[in-house]
Amino acid sequence: QQLNDNWNNLQQLKNAKESALSVAQSSLRFQEMCDETQAWINEKDVSLSSEDCGRDLASVQALQRRHNTLERELAPVEERLEKLKQMAREVVASNRAESKNVKERQAEILHLWEKLKVKAENRKAQLDNAHLLHTFLVDSR
């Protein structure tokens, strides 16, 4: 009987350890996804920081093509952010101790994303205005 009790205790300890490892792994995957997403956002932020609006119509059009490519790259990030939100909910549900850190990290990433979207919109408007100006200058010659 004692052997069975010891075996059951050992099984319970193993299950508890597996559960704790699973929670830790989920938390780590969430943090890694946050780090990757933040690095990607920072990389795109740098490319949107350019003040270059082109010196003629052809250069403006080239910049607009590059910007359109960048905007296409932004589209799938919404899906990634939804996955990140889901991961955050799962980590919070399974590990209350990490709740505050997870929510803060999620909020930080979402804030960076919103800033990036605004920056992309502003850059597009800036390039559209430059295109109008250079088109006007070409037409007025």
Image (cartoon, rainbow, N blue to C red):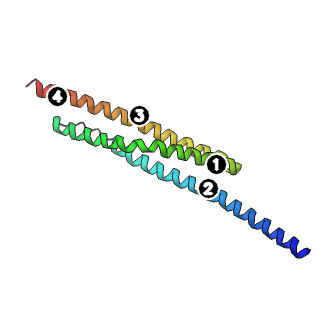
Label 3: state its secondary structure: helix
First in sequence: mark 4 vs mark 1? 1
Question: What is the x, y in percent for residue 14?
Answer: 75, 67
Counting residues from the start of the chain, the first of labels 4 and 2 encountered is 2
Q: Quadrant of the C terminus?
A: top left
- Asked whether the residues under the numbered discs 2 and 1 touch, taking CB atoms below 8 Å apart as contact, a structural biologist would say yes
The answer to whether residue 136 is seen in the rendering is yes
Residue at screen point 49% across, 46% down: 80
Given residues 118 and 78, the one toward you in this image is 78
Q: Disc 4 or disc 1, which is closer to the eye?
A: 1
Single out the mark in the foreground, 3 or 1: 1
Query: From what the image shows, is residue 81 above or below residue 7?
Result: above
Q: Amino acid at mark 3?
A: Val
Say which of 38 and 65 sits in front: 65
Report which residue position mark 2 lands on: 26
The residue indicated by pointer 4 is: 135
Distance from Cα at disc 4 to Cα at disc 1: 53 Å
Q: Closer to the N terminus: mark 2 or mark 3?
A: 2
Image location (x, y in percent) of residue 24: 65, 58
Tell me which numbered mark, 3 or 1, is placed earlier along the sequence. Answer: 1
Task: From the viewer's perspective, tell me whether residue 40 is left or right of residue 86.
Answer: left
C-alpha distance separating marks 4 and 3 = 26 Å
Q: Secondary structure at mark 1?
A: helix
Which quadrant of the view contains residue 47? top left
- Which residue has dot 1 on it? 90
Amino acid type, mark 2 = Ser
Q: Circle 3 sits on which residue?
A: 118
| Disc 4 from disc 2: Cα separation | 53 Å
- The mark nearer the N terminus, 4 or 3, is 3
